Image (tube, rainbow, N blue to C red):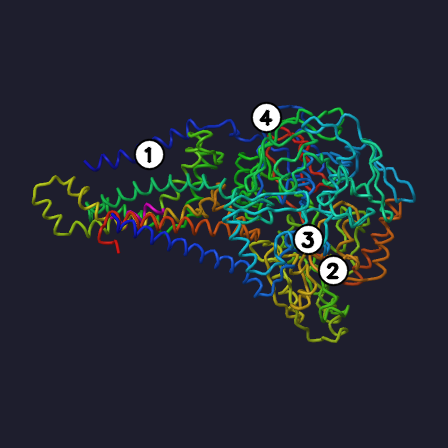
Amino acid sequence: MTSVITYIIRRLLLAAVMLLVITLVTFGIFFYLPRLAGQTPFDVAAQYVGKSPTTGQILSVEHKLGLDQPLLVQFWHFIQGLVAGVHYNYGSDKTYCPPPCFGYSFKNQQPVWPLMISRFPVTLSLAVGAAVLWLVGGVATGVLSALRKGSIFDRAAMGIALAGVSLPIFFTGLLSLTLFSYHWQIFPNLQYVGITQNPLEWARNLVLPWVTLAFLYAALYARLTRAGMLETMGEDYIRTARAKGLPERVVIFKHALRATFTPLMTIFGLDLGLLLGGAFITEYTYSLPGLGQFALVAVQNQDMPEVLGTTLFAAFCIVLANLIVDVLYAVIDPRVRY
Amino acid sequence: MKKPHRLTLISAGAVLSLGLAACGSSAKTTSTPSQGAGYGAATTTVVNSSAHKGGTLIYVNSQDWDSPDPGNTYYGWSWDFARLYSRTLVTYSAVPGTAGEKLVPDLATSLGQVSNSGLTWTYHLRQGVKLEDGETVTSQMIKYAIERSSAYTPGAGKPAVLPLGPTYWSVFLKDPTYPSAYYDKTPGKMGLTGISTPDPSTIVFNLTKPMAEFDYLATLAQTAPVPEAKDTGTSYLKHPLSSGPYMFQGNYTPGKGMTLVKNPNWDPSTDPVRKQLVDKIVVTVSVPATDEDNRLLSGQADLDISGRGVSPSDSARVLLNSKNKASADDVLDGFYIYTALNTKVAPFNNIHCREAVLYAADHAELQTAYGGSYGGDISTQALPPQVGGYIPGYDPYGFAAHPHGDLTAAKQQLALCGQPNGFSTTIATRNASDDPKENAGAVALQAELAKVGIHADLYQYPAAQIGSVVGTPDFVHSHHLGLMMYGWGPDWPAGFGFLNAIVNGAAITPAGNSNLEELNDPAINSELNNVMAINSISGRSQVYSQIDRQVMQDAVFLPIVNLKSLLYRNPRLSNVFYNAALLMYDYSQIGLK
């Protein structure tokens, strides 16, 4: 197992380096590129005051946001904050931003990390619920389609899957909202309720978003599973297993599906990682207060620290998902360890 | 074998969903809405007048607060909503229409008492007014609230704490360089000499020059009392202590909203303005506009508190459906839409080139861009109708007679300014995703000006950067932004509040500027500087009318429309009416039928 451990350690170090690079690039994009376009820190600060401000006010805000310092110093403060936290002292108003401090939101006058972390359960609920649905539904459909290749079920399923992959989420989402929430009032008054508050309400309010999101991915997974299954079922060892007299169910689930599953698992890990960073369109359509909606509002408000925070968080989720998938792969398939 | 397995899954899922839907029916679901009171009923009358108590209001908002802290907010809807949890020295009457512009004392016993040749304003406070924690409201709390507000900053080199609200106090009170309560080292933080508190129920304002409209300043949310010991600075917005009929339950969460519940320490006998009818008010923010409209029209939400009205894509659903239309009001939202012509960007330094633009504009098309007759009324002068001094029928460039522009006159003006074949310029506008109406207006104007040979490019920018684009004169000059699309809403319904920031030469600032045309007309400047010494409303109105005429003569404004919003009210609401000072429904009155 030592090779696995070395492998894991190497991957961890690589992940850490990647995160640092991503932080640097993101910081550069949000704080350096505007300067290249001619925007001065004074201009940026002017966005964060009320109407008709005085010059003194703008300069005060500039100082408060640290915009009057060189970019590398700002970046260094940011890294310091991530690791050790930051004290914001404005005369008698003192705020402490505990680590990991992803910065201080200009518009909301709050540290970014608590805002993000309070929204994470929503995105988690949405992503995990949809993931369960699409995995079960997609894989099952794909397996059945592969086994009944050419049948009416197969053609219908793949037809619907094509629709699922092609129809954008904002279309299917709005359609299901109009039909099931506003018109037929089957799921009226959609509003996110935490699972700890009321599990039944939590589930009820998430059914429509789950199904909408899962429909897209299930379609994808159905097609992938079907293709993978068809390929695997044609392999020699399947023929051997049948020749040995194993029941069909064992042949499919124990042998064929296992082989099909490994690439699916890689994709699943990446998809889930991406979603954990925020399912933007779904959250926006259903007004779910998750990380995706948070990011969209932050972009609309040009709130750079919040956008930086969500970008980094999403990057972190993807890197972590990548890492887990790679490790699992290495554990399962010894050929991969290098 | 597999078939039943798959079918079982599907049917199990379906049964589960339906089961959840069935047992998930919450008390929040409203039944089919009853009949609305009639189109426009709330503009002039109180709809569903009732004293019925109880229930929960469901409010939504497509925007989010800049800050629910009354000392640090600048949205009109935020000030209106703040009436629920904050009382101010003076406030607007809770009556429909233009009668709502009348000022009435709120925390004070009467409107301000003026003395010392207009330099001293004194207010006496009502007895028995308490905050939600049981503390009695004192004049020191009001003084502290103003000291901590956006009006005062420590200046360059020290960070400002609450920069988002209005800055009027430091302009009119003595001691303008007071460094804000957060840098005040005096005991109790009462260092601002511009305000005196001789006893806990008297507050005295010491001005540097007369300001006859000071009572309007006293309506600002920044006069809501804040106890110094409980002020948490930038965190105060989570739960500002209430002096009104409702208080926050728990905290406000940015991006999500908050819930208000009854404030047990609000005494109705001290408050002739507000009502405390419902038990709870739930506010959800950052709801996408179309989702918000759907919730309103299906009865699942009660009001959109941003007051911006139904989005243009859903207006047809309201206006063409008689049932929905009976619950709608098309109201003036106070915003005056115009194009500013910058006097420092050539060739607009020449008045005739400016006049050419005014004559060439096609107002019918511009009105269409802003939503047609439901979106706004064509404006022909420099004041909106709700401001004293507005001159009914004043139309110096003949917009009413020539709704499609007067191209002959435009060409004559072009010849007079030495550009008979037209010239090139740039129109600055917010981009289409931030402000679709303004963007459409700019495109329409571009086409209209092309007819007389004025070739205009479009410069589009995100709304959030307005202060650093059109609001920064250096940027305007370097990018040749001769024409700038703009909208301006007065902070209070009187001339000084409307005009000063947009036409006074002394109000030009290096960033966040609102005098976009950089007008510096000595006649207008001196009129504005002196109007505040005139004590009578009619006297001041005459001055504002004069400024109106002068601005139009200077041809620095192309008036476009007075914007209107199509507001929708859920038929189950009681005591709903439009107040012309708050420019939307008065949220301090609403209950359930």
Q: Nearer the viewer, mark 2 or mark 4?
A: 4
Q: Are marks 3 and 1 in contact (CB under 8 Å)?
A: no
Q: Amino acid at mark 2?
A: Phe
Q: Nearer the viewer, mark 3 or mark 2?
A: 3
Mark 2 packing: few (<14 Cα in 10 Å), some, or many (20+)? many
Placement of B156 over or under B305, stated as above or below: below
Chain letter, disc 2 residue: B
Task: Name the foreground residue: A321 vs B291.
Answer: A321
- Residue under label 3: A60
Mark 3 touches mark 2? (CB < 8 Å): no
**Image quadrant occupied by the C terminus of chain B:** top right
Q: Earlier in the sequence, mark 4 or mark 1?
A: 1
Q: Position of residue A157 (x, y in %)?
A: 27, 46
Q: CA distance from mark 4 to mark 1?
A: 35 Å
Q: Are marks 2 and 4 on the same chain?
A: yes
Residue tagged by mark 1?
B13
The segment highlighted magenta reads A216-225
On whether residue B9 falls in the magenta region, the answer is: no
Determine the chain carrying the residue at label 4: B
Image quarter in which the N terminus of chain B is found: top left
Q: Which mark is residue B55?
A: 4
**Quadrant of the image occupied by residue B426:** bottom right
Towards the viewer: B512 or B490: B512
Residue B530 in the image: state x and y as whole percent. Answer: 87, 53
Q: How far is mark 3 from mark 2, CA to CA?
A: 33 Å
Q: Is residue A81 left or right of residue A49?
A: left
Q: Are marks 3 and 1 on the same chain?
A: no
Q: Name the residue beneath numbered marker 2.
A: B557
